Image (tube, rainbow, N blue to C red):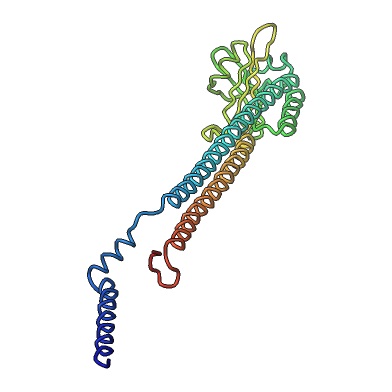
């Protein structure tokens, strides 16, 4: 009886040893490592894979939609803003044209054509000093009232051209020869001529106008008015600055929106990966779920 019990215990211990060896061996041995590695690399469940893929695709579509909308808004803003600036430039050109034209006609109204016809040399101006000085005062006052840069009158004497009145330099250039520019040459043909520069053209400093003065149907002189382009350029520069500020603000806002959407997209990817890891791995040990 004692021998049988001893044999039974020995058999149980042997069986337990075999079982323990079987359990421990796959874990400690090379086969166990290969087995665990195969578990770690097991393919994702199709349902989880499809759900994660659909989520990322939907978020990518949303990100693309936001980017497209941002580009569309920026493009439309730029187009309509530049369109508005071009319209403003057209208004500035029309305003400058009207100002120069009205000033030329207003100046001609102050000048007596018969007096101009009689002025051929400085002595003639001295002989008619009252009328001459009265006209000079009138056009000088007009210059300051309309904020013109210069008003002067060019008299033709045969092949020579003399300045008979000049508000610049206190009429110091009166009765001096002058070379005609293009608009003055055109004005001596009997045509009102203008030279209006585009706003923002920094190479030009004056907008000019030349109006013919007739005496017995003959052009004897040309009334010239010059306006500085400074005020027109300043208005154009202000408009351009506002345009660039608006475009820059919209571009910055769209860039921030794109970056935020991209950050959310990356965060969503991390959340999806975290949920997948929680579903397929033990939180405590980090081992794959069996």
Residue at image x 45%, y 50%?
47
Q: Quadrant of the N terminus?
A: bottom left
Rendering coords of residue 237 (x, y %): 59, 39
Residue at image x 54%, y 43%?
66
Residue 133's image quarter? top right
Residue in front for this viewpoint, 35 or 87:
35
On the rendered structure, is 249 left or right of 272?
right
Rendering coords of residue 224 (x, y %): 64, 23
Q: Residue lying farthest bottom? A: 2
Q: How many marks?
A: 0
On the rendered structure, is 37 left or right of 175?
left
Rendering coords of residue 277 (x, y %): 43, 61
Rendering coords of residue 287 (x, y %): 38, 68
Residue in front for this viewpoint, 201 or 120:
201
Q: Quadrant of the C terminus?
A: bottom left
Residue in front for this viewpoint, 252 or 34:
34
Measured along the vertical axis of the image, is residue 27 above or below residue 154?
below
Residue 190's image quarter? top right
Residue at image x 28%, y 76%?
19
Residue in front for this viewpoint, 86 or 53:
53
Q: Residue lying farthest left? A: 30
On the rendered structure, is 148 left or right of 82?
right
Q: Residue lying farthest top? A: 217
């Amino acid at each position: 009886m004692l021998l049988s019990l001893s044999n039974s215990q020995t058999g149980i211990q042997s069986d337990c040893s075999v079982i323990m060896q079987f359990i421990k061996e796959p874990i400690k041995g090379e086969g166990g490592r290969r087995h665990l590695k195969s578990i770690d690399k097991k393919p994702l469940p199709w349902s989880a894979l499809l759900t994660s893929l659909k989520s990322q695709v939907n978020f990518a579509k949303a990100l693309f939609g936001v980017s497209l909308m941002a580009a569309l808004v920026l493009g439309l803003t730029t187009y309509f803003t530049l369109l508005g600036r071009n319209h403003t430039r057209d208004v500035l050109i029309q305003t400058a044209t009207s100002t120069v034209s009205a000033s030329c006609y207003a100046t001609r109204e102050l000048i007596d054509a018969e007096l101009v016809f009689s002025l051929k040399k400085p002595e003639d101006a001295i002989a008619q000093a009252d009328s001459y000085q009265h006209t000079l005062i009138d056009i000088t006052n007009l210059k300051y009232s309309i904020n013109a840069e210069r008003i002067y009158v060019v008299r033709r004497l045969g092949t020579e051209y003399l300045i008979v009145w000049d508000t610049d330099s206190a009429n110091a250039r009166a009765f001096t020869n002058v070379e005609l520019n293009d608009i003055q040459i055109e004005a001596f043909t009997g045509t009102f001529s203008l030279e209006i520069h585009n706003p923002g053209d920094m190479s030009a400093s004056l907008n000019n106008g030349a109006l013919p003065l007739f005496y017995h149907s003959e052009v004897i002189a040309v009334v010239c008015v010059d306006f500085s382009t400074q005020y027109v350029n300043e208005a154009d520069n202000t408009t351009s600055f506002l345009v660039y500020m608006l475009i820059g603000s919209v571009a910055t806002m769209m860039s921030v929106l794109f970056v935020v959407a991209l950050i959310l997209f990356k965060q969503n990817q991390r959340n999806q990966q975290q949920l997948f890891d929680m579903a397929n791995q033990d939180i405590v040990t980090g081992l794959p779920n069996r």
